Image (spheres, rainbow, N blue to C red):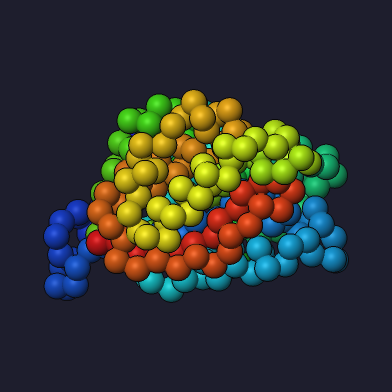
Amino acid sequence: MSGRLPGRCADLPSPGGVRGDGSPRGITAAICPPAPLLARELTGLDPVIPELRQACAAAAGQLVETGPEVIAVVGPGRRTAVWPADGRLDLAAFGPALGPALGTRGGSVSGRPPLPLPLGLGARLLDESGYSGPRLLQSVHTGEPAAACLRLGAGLRTLSDRIGLLVMADGSACRTLRAPGYLDPRAAAFDAAIADAVRSGDLASLRAMDSDLARELLAAGRPGWQVLAGAMPGRAASTQVLYEGDPFGVFYLVAWLAGE
């Protein structure tokens, strides 16, 4: 990992098989797409794909309700780095007027640094779910090798006895003629493999994901999927898919997983 949890307290439980109170350690994960339409400022009063927003809110809410001692938000970025936990959502790329005034968590700029969109959206989902505990915001370079992503995921797993993981990742962007990458006949099978892995709780196929194919299909979320696989090496004890679809030709999956 390229950094450590800002403000991590010495009294956080150390990794191990059981917690000090005798309860088992574990990891839970929520998956949401880093879709700009999740930001209400960009869609106005008439929400776009409200069921997607509702599913993301539910997944983040379930993650918070499990009571993690720290939540790590993982999303693609231009570099692999840990960002300040109090960073703000920056929407300036979609509308300069939205940047400093409307893109800030909690409604105050107060010098908070702008975050990459996936991390900013993830942080907002946590805020809206009422989470106020320790958080780590981790971007992963879109070209990060699979082995590095898996190691990063394994490292996140050791942050605490009970870790929550919010993965901001999507699939291919080549599902329809109007998709950002046009229609590619390989996209459906690529995305189906992701959905099947999450639904079954067996993430082995994500660990072995073809990074070259992912790049050709404009699947920028590939590093996030592999970080997730590194953090959950065993079969998830339970899974729930809350949304699956390809609006605008981009594959979106919203899910929740519980591991050990």
Task: Tell me the residue at 73%/35% (across/down).
Answer: 182
Closer to the camera in the image, 69 or 57: 57
Name above or below for residue 92 compared with residue 130: above
Image x and y of residue 31, in percent: 50, 56
Which of the 4 quarters of the picture holds residue 105? bottom right
The answer to whether residue 161 is left or right of residue 200 is left
- Which part of the image, by quadrant, shows the N terminus? top left
Q: How many marks?
A: 0
Closer to the camera in the image, 249 or 18: 249
Residue at the far front: name it.
185
Image x and y of residue 143, in percent: 49, 26
Residue 135 seen by the camera = no
Image x and y of residue 214, in percent: 52, 33
Task: Tell me the residue at 58%/60% (across/down).
Answer: 244
Closer to the camera in the image, 191 or 123: 191
Which of the 4 quarters of the picture holds residue 14? bottom left
- Which part of the image, by quadrant, shows the C terminus? bottom left
Task: Tell me the residue at 85%/60% (across/down).
Answer: 44
Name above or below for residue 217 compared with residue 7: above
The answer to whether residue 241 is left or right of residue 23 is right
Residue 99 seen by the camera = yes
The answer to whether residue 36 is left or right of residue 135 is right
Name above or below for residue 128 compared with residue 191: below
Image x and y of residue 136, in percent: 44, 48
Task: Tell me the residue at 36%/37% (across/down).
Answer: 208
